[in-house]
Amino acid sequence: WPNKGDVDPRPNQNQKYQWVGLTAAVISLSSFYNLVYHNYSVNDTNSLSWYWLFSGIFLQGLWGLYGYSNYILPTMILTPLMTIGFLALLYLKVKLDTDIL
């Protein structure tokens, strides 16, 4: 570039198709929160295994680390919202399946 401090105005590969990631994030959220809503409305978590819940929370942590370290906007938006849904389902499962709450 002409000057040392100038920034390259061309989008990098992560930003080029960012709209695809944002669209996928919106569809994923609507699908996942439909599951969260359903489980809360029927007060039944028998179809949700403990392994699925804990692995989902762990995976969201990994995706969050990856997304924030590489500044990937769709992942940065999706991960905290998915984590909230997983924690809500975990709370419901603990409440319904154990005597803890």
Image (cartoon, helix red, strand yellow):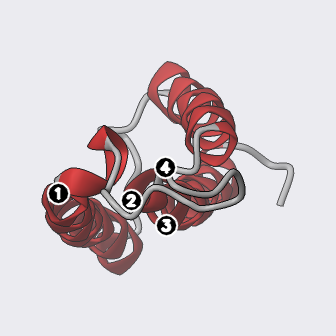
Spatial CA span between label 4 and label 2? 29 Å
Please tell me which of labels 1 and 4 falls first in the chain: 4
Residues at discs 1 and 2 in contact (Cβ within 8 Å): yes
User: Which percent across, then down, holds residue 25?
Assistant: 27, 61
Marks 4,2: beta carbons within 8 A: no
Residue 65 x, y percent position in the rendering: 68, 36
Q: Secondary structure at mark 1?
A: helix
The residue under label 3 is 77
Which residue is situated farthest in the right direction here? 100
Q: CA distance from mark 3 to mark 2?
A: 5 Å
* Residue ID for mark 4: 1
Which is nearer the N-term, disc 3 or disc 4? 4
In the visual, does 59 lie left or right of 95? left
**N-terminal-most mark, 4 or 2:** 4
Q: Rate crowding at label 3 as few (under 14), some (14 to 19) or many (20 or more) other CA atoms within 10 Å.
A: some
Mark 2 Cα shell of 10 Å, populated few (<14), some (14-19), many (≥20): some
What is the crowding at mark 4: few (fewer than 14 residues within 10 Å), some, or many (at least 20)? few
**Residue tagged by mark 1?**
24
Question: Residue 74: which disc?
Answer: 2
The kind of residue on which mark 4 rests is: Trp
Cα–Cα gap, marks 1 and 4: 35 Å
Q: CA distance from mark 1 to mark 2?
A: 8 Å
Other-residue count near label 1 (Cα within 10 Å), few / some / many at <14 / 14–19 / ≥20: some
Q: Is label 1 in contact with label 3 (beta carbons under 8 Å)? A: no
Q: Are marks 3 and 4 in contact (CB under 8 Å)?
A: no
Q: Are marks 3 and 2 in contact (CB under 8 Å)?
A: yes
In the displayed structure, would residue 66 be above or below residue 83?
A: above
Residue at 58% x, 55% y is 83
Residue found 72% across the figure and 43% down from its top: 98
Q: Which percent across, then down, holds residue 93? A: 57, 50
Separation (CA) of disc 3 from disc 4: 32 Å
